[in-house]
Image (tube, grey):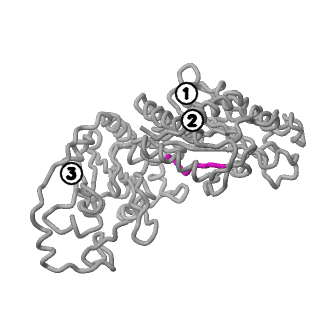
Amino acid sequence: MTEGQTDGTPTDGTESHDPDFPEAFLSFMRQGWRDTALPVTPRPETPNYAKRRAALSAAFPGETLVIPTGTEKVRANDTDYPFRPGSDFAYLTGDHDADSVLVLRPNGSGHDATLYMRPRSSRETDEFFRSRNGELWVGRRHTLGEKSTELGLPTADLTGLEATLADLAPGRTRVLRGFDAQVDAAVRPYDGPRVEGQPARDRELAIAISEMKLVKDEWEIGQLQDAIDATVRGFEDVARILPADRAVSERLLEGVFALRARHDGNDVGYGSIVGAGEHATILHWVHNHGATRPGDLLLMDMGVEGHNLYTADVTRVLPVNGRFTALQRQVYDIVYASQQAGIEAIRPGVKFKDVHLTCMRVLAEGLAELGLLPVGVDEAMDEKSTVYRRWTLHGFGHMLGIDVHDCSNARKETYRDGALGEGYVLTVEPGLYFQPEDELVPAELRGVGIRIEDDVLVTATGAVNLSAGLPRTSDEVETWLAEQREAGPRLPS
């Protein structure tokens, strides 16, 4: 990485260790630059964002709404993590730049929307070459006009945000808090009740946006399908380089998938889980410092995040040597039966909890067949027992969209305790996990972890598996893995 060389003043993007420059150099740098405009055009999806802002406006008439995207986060010293915009902000604007803030101010019949943003560094000052935020360091930013043209949204210089926020009345303003400390501090919370540590009024804003996201429109479903299709290609890439007869590192497989994610999308939608052998029993295994071994299973939970930030979330389990053992197949088939039962149960009006119970009963019945349940299936399923969960741990799935765990601020009665609706997209991902230290299971089961996860759209008549491009049954997995290995490695094109 190139070391920043700026003016020695630790403000406005400079660093304390940066040297001063001689006046001759500064004078030379200030001349001879040709100015060019970015070739921006209105993005075709901007009507979707405008429609969402209108819906949010209708939910809070006469009130000012402040939605920040967030700021860059320090990774180490003077280096930052790659910036990913706040999901709610991106859902309402389509903008991906750091530090921006959307302000919706009431106008009598609705709201006027303004996007406060950091415009390009002017050539009238030295910022463009002296600041680490200058465009010679980070690239050309949009002007206010260019951003407005692209997003179909009025824009204003971020330097004017402080005065705007200072003018807002606490009792008539709601802020999406927790994304930008300066915005949080600038708008004093209303002196009223608090929910989950936030002012109740601000919490209601977060809830409203989250519940808007429950129903996906046609464009969003297309975005999800694109991300899922790229994810299918990523799994194929991994299968094609997975040797059947020798060990390779989990991180090699993670990296191969990440190449596909960066090439075909924005990035991975979450930290990839690549669990070989007993690592498959650790639900959020992201260290990925183990290695595959012929005869073991390999669990991979991975998803591509598309260019507009909608993400896939898919899990598959492969027998490294190409064939399941009899016991591995038995456990795999139990999990598949659970997932299939859950998918078949999905349709509008069905309770989220009922899909969960459908999946869990099949798992409990499978555990009984394996001779593991200490009680009968009905007693194990009773709310006062649920002992079957020793080997399942998690629920059947979650909402999916612009976040991998989408709609997380929705009220319990509209999500976990609510009914599914047409246009919902959710994962179905039952699993069984037998920890290597578990003395209540036979030795041959210890270290076996199996989860099958697909991304499912609720339609008017039932459900569509958006990730059906990957095999699910044990026989199909074996055939598919052999086909991928025969096809051989490939680079994204």
Identified by mark 2, the residue type is Leu
Q: Where's the N terminus, which quadrant?
A: bottom left
- State which region is magenta: 268-275
On residue 426, the disc is: 2
Tell me if residue 73 comes above or below residue 301 in the rendering. Answer: below
Q: Residue at x 59, y 33 (%)?
A: 484
The residue that mark 1 highlights is: 458
Tell me if residue 4 comes above or below residue 258 in the rendering. Answer: below
Quadrant in which residue 128 is drawn: bottom left
Q: Measure the C-alpha gap from mark 2 to mark 3.
A: 37 Å
- Contact between marks 1 and 2 (CB within 8 A): the answer is yes
From this viewpoint, is residue 175 visible?
A: yes
The local secondary structure at tag 3 comes to: helix
Q: Residue at x 23, y 51 (%)?
A: 142
Tell me if residue 427 comes above or below residue 444 in the rendering. Answer: above
Between 94 and 316, the residue placed more toward the observer is: 316
